[in-house]
Amino acid sequence: MNLSQILYRLQQIDSQLDQSRTRLQAIETALTEDAALRQAQMNAKNAEEVYRSASKALRTAEANVTAQRIKIEQTEAALYGGRVRAPKELQDLQNESVSLKKYLGTLEDQQLDAMLAVEESENAHKSAQAALQQAIGTQAEHQAGLKGEQSELLKTVDRLTVERQAAVTSIASDALGAYERLRQQRRGIAVAKVTGRTCSACGTILNTSVVQAAASPSQLTPCPTCGRILYIG
Ligand SMILES: [Zn+2]
């Protein structure tokens, strides 16, 4: 293998390493993201609070109805018990009974509304719980997928690192230095393959003398436009 060929091989290894490392970073970030799960947790918590407060309101409404019925029973016991005889007092008791019964109707309506609110919030609570379970499952599945990909990529990085070490040993230090500098200056691509007289990295059409120079095994030839090392495959 001539030098441009070895550098091109090194370039391929480095590009794959770059890709793998970029993806590994994205996976690291994705593994810490749980926005959907946190939203589902918040929804479930809110729905539970609404359900609890509706249940509490229903208990209050039920207690109000019960207390009102007791008042009515007591008033009617006095009215029909026979101990109250004065017509004025009896009339007062009669009026009180009518008004207590009228208000009982209002309290019973409130109780019915409270029951409907409980039913509705209970259903919403159940739905939010189911959505939360689903979000937990989805998150676990997603994380398992990412972790699988992560472990494959780490193996790839290990393998490429070994291949890179082997490739680097046969490259003179000045050539390697030039390669590394070009990698930094040219967004990671130091070696460009020539395909049909064209620099594959920048698209420049190369003249014959440049192509001939690039074909020579004894020297490195830069692309006259982008400066990358040309490799004729
Ligand atoms: Zn070029």
Image (cartoon, rainbow, N blue to C red):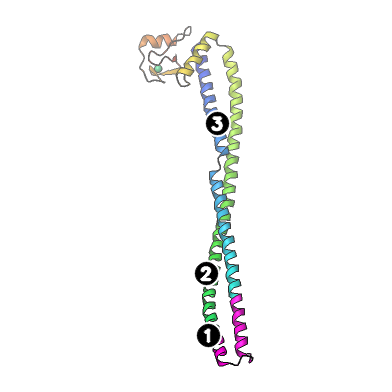
- Viewer can see residue 10: yes
Magenta highlight range: 67-93
Task: Compare marks 1 and 2 and give the one earlier in the sequence.
Answer: 1
Q: Which residue is mark 3?
A: 25
Residue 95 is marked as 1
Task: Compare marks 2 and 3 and give the one earlier in the sequence.
Answer: 3
Q: Which amino acid is tagged 3? A: Gln
**Ligand 1 is within 8 Å of the C-beta of the residue at disc 1:** no
- Percent x, y for residue 195? 41, 19
Q: Which residue is mark 2?
A: 113
| Tag 1 near tag 3, CB within 8 Å | no
Q: Which amino acid is tagged 1? A: Asn
Assign ligand 1 to one image quadrant.
top left
- For the stretch drawn in magenta, the main secondary structure is helix
Q: Which amino acid is tagged 2? A: Asp
Q: How would you rate the neighbour count of disc 1 (Cα within 10 Å): few for under 14, some for 14-19, many for 20 or more? A: few
Nearer to the camera, 211 or 122: 122
Q: Is residue 191 magenta?
A: no
Front of the two marks 2 and 3 = 2
Secondary structure beneath label 1: helix
Secondary structure beneath label 2: helix
- Viewer can see residue 2: no
Q: CA distance from mark 1 to mark 3?
A: 80 Å
